[in-house]
Image (cartoon, rainbow, N blue to C red):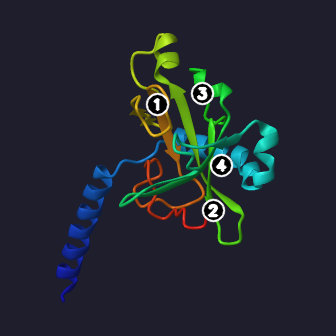
């Protein structure tokens, strides 16, 4: 391969990489900073024994299931929710309404994500017309009739401690398992 051919190949590769980078959504510097702050403030809950005293309690679905999984999609894990902020329309990055844990083979729980939750009625009652968003990502609307028996609510997962191939804000994580629940 001649020097010209190598330079041309490298140039085409650089253009290709730049084009792909433009198509992949990225986080702003502010979102990265907020995520770093969240990781720092929520890391205390990696010690599961800190969740209860901070107001987080086990949340099960209408069938009494604690570890939430979806065949073919993956799992979320076991949710510990601080119920009072769920009806508060202020979505504060450093104060997630839920901590999400994955059961481990040794019987312990490992913090894998946090989740932000707000009822649609509280959100709209505060005068909001667009869905909530944090870190540049819009919350997902979960309609009434859901497996939790809740009215319409908005939710956003943030997988800070367990890689999610569906993305940092994906709802289900195929790398999370309820096998040890």
The residue wearing badge 4 is 39
Q: Nearer the viewer, residue 21 or 46?
A: 46
Dot placed on the residue nearer the N-terminal end, 2 or 1 = 2
Q: Give the CA separation, mark 3 to mark 4.
A: 20 Å
Could you say which disc has been placed on residue 154 in the image?
1
Q: Are marks 3 and 1 in contact (CB under 8 Å)?
A: no
* Residue located 44% across and 26% down the image: 152
Residue drawn at x 35%, y 61% is: 72
Q: Report the side of 119 relative to 167 (left or right).
A: right
Task: Look at 47% across and 42% down and name the residue there.
Answer: 28
Mark with earlier residue (3, 4): 4
Q: CA distance from mark 3 to mark 2?
A: 24 Å
Circle 1 — which element? strand
Determine whether the residue tagged by mark 2 lies in a helix, strand or loop. Answer: strand
Residue named by callout 2 = 103
Q: Is residue 120 above or below residue 140?
A: above
| Label 2 close to label 1 by CB (< 8 Å) | no
Q: Nearer the viewer, mark 3 or mark 4?
A: 3
Q: Determine which quarter of the picture holds residue 35.
A: top right
Q: Which residue is mark 3?
A: 86
Mark closer to the chain start, 4 or 2: 4
């Amino acid at each position: 391969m001649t020097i010209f051919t190598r330079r041309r190949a490298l140039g085409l590769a650089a253009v290709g990489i730049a084009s792909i980078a433009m198509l992949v959504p990225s986080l702003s510097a502010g979102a990265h900073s907020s995520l770093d702050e969240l990781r720092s403030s929520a890391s205390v809950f990696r010690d599961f024994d800190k969740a209860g005293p901070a107001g987080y309690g086990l949340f099960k679905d209408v069938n009494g299931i604690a570890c939430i999984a979806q065949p073919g999609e993956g799992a979320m894990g076991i949710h510990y929710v601080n119920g009072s902020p769920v009806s508060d329309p202020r979505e504060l990055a450093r104060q997630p309404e839920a901590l999400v844990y994955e059961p481990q083979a040794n019987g312990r729980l490992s913090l894998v994500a946090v989740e932000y939750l707000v009822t649609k009625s509280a959100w709209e009652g505060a005068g909001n017309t667009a869905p909530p968003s944090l870190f540049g990502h819009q919350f997902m609307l979960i309609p009434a009739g859901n497996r939790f028996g809740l009215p319409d609510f908005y939710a956003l997962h943030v997988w800070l401690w367990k890689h999610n191939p569906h993305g940092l804000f994906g709802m289900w994580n195929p790398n999370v398992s309820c096998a040890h629940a």
